[in-house]
Amino acid sequence: MIVLSSRHEITLDAFERVAWNGEPVQIAPEALARVAAAREGFLRLAARPDVTIYGVTSGYGDRAGGRLDDEDRHRQSIAAARRAASFGEPLPERVARGIVLARLANLIDGNSAVSPRLLEAVAALLDGNPLPRVSAHGNGGSGEILALAHLFGPLIETFDGGDKEGHALINGSPCSAGLAADAALGARRRLELAYDVFALSVEAFDAPLDPYARELEELWADKYETRALQALRLRLDPAVPRRTHQAPVSFRILPRVLGQVERALAAAEDVAAVSLSSVTDNPVYLPPDRHFSDGRVLSTGGYHNAAAPATMHQLAVCWADLCQLAERHVERLVFPQREAHSDADEIQRLLLMVAVGYAEEARALTQPPILPRGGPGQNDVAAPSFLAWSREENAGRCLEASLAVLAGTATHLLTRDTQPALLTLREACEPVVAALRAEAAFGDELQQLVVRLRERIHS
């Protein structure tokens, strides 16, 4: 169990523990006391006739200019639960859990002005029971209310809340934070898989090791390419005989391209870490201080996370690039000569057709998530984080399939021992190798290999 006392403890590590590993969350007593004090200050502020608070004393959206009476204020708070208009395939449970965790960043330091009781109720959603289905599609709003209403609507409907509490659960950008964190965690594991498979391909091709030499670290002077050089060398055997002439470009540029993935991953991890602990509510409440005895509220654009879709897009581009490299490697391995000479050769060459299919599918997923138009009136720009996550996730799946094709091809052609780091991967490829040796269809075996590779990422 994770015990949270402030939003700064909602880190990428906490996200992995709660969202991916299913750990529950408890709110520390000092956080509950801080939230209670903020709630008292906010209620005093909201009772003042000279203060307008968006979505509380006024309507929201295009009704922001109108002042509400007590009955309208209560009705508006409950109405927040009824914004779940999106539909389609749901987000994975791990992502929904991550969004709930990210939601706590707004609540736990008092900046949403909710009661301690609601804070604990949100944390209790992570106790292990299934969460409401949250559509991964159709979320074209200016913020994230369509998805958040799916996630928190049942709680709002059954919770006897007060001013701002319903609205506080569906505003801000916790979805962007959760999506970016999910992409970053998956990217680290996917990159480790890519290192294994490309190293296996280098070994199967007997490519010279000059492009991975230690001396290049100082010559290139790039910390991300250094990481790639080191990761590849850990997996390559320097003691075996190799080709006497340089390998094709697709082999020699591996450290450069994988170094760019390291760079994109570092940016994704940074964006995820910042987003998870950010206060993004609108309006955001600043608790009382010596200048403002009741605190104050600010209307903001916190519900729009511009960094998350940009960094997820860059990851999608990296996955597409690696798909292209995997396709080139498959071709180099199965086309040692220009013409086929046997039925077995022809069957092996089908592997390239499969690799091309996934590489082109990944290429199509690299459209930049530029700002889309929103709805009418105030909501004139939509938030693209869901679009970016969907493209990154699907491009990653294409890469996993491409890597499965390359790993199966390389294992089939590799007749000598490799470094121990590659042994598990080679064993996983044996069913594909058996199908190729039997000159049989190998699609089912490749699909099973993809499943096993994906388990390495989302285990």
Image: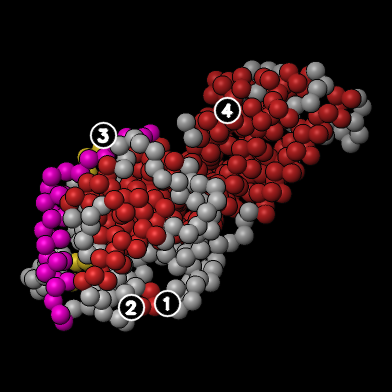
Task: List x then y, in percent, for residue 331.
Answer: 77, 38
Please report the bounds of the magenta region as a residue range: 21-50
> How far apart are labels 3 and 4 at the CA level?
29 Å
Residue identifier under label 2: 64
Foreground mark, 2 or 1, reads 2
Q: Which class describes the residues within 10 Å of circle 4: few (<14), some (14-19), or many (20+)?
A: some
Task: Tell me the mark number nearer the camera, choosing from 3 and 4.
Answer: 3
Q: Secondary structure at mark 4?
A: helix
Of label 1 and label 4, which has the lower sequence position? 1
- Give the numbered dot on residue 452: 4
First along the sequence among labels 1 and 3: 3
In depth, the one of 447 and 117 nearer the eye is: 117
Q: Earlier in the sequence, mark 3 or mark 2?
A: 3
Q: Amino acid at mark 4?
A: Arg
Task: Check disc 3 and report the residue beneath it.
Answer: 1
User: Are discs 2 and 1 less than 8 Å apart at CB?
Assistant: yes
Query: Residue 149 appears in which quarter of the rendering?
Result: bottom left
Estimate the x, y position of residue 174 in percent, counting from the top left.
Answer: 37, 55
Q: Residue furthest front?
A: 71
94 over 443 or under it: above or below: below
Residue 183 position in % (x across, y down) = 48, 47
Which residue in the structure is indicated by mark 1?
A: 378
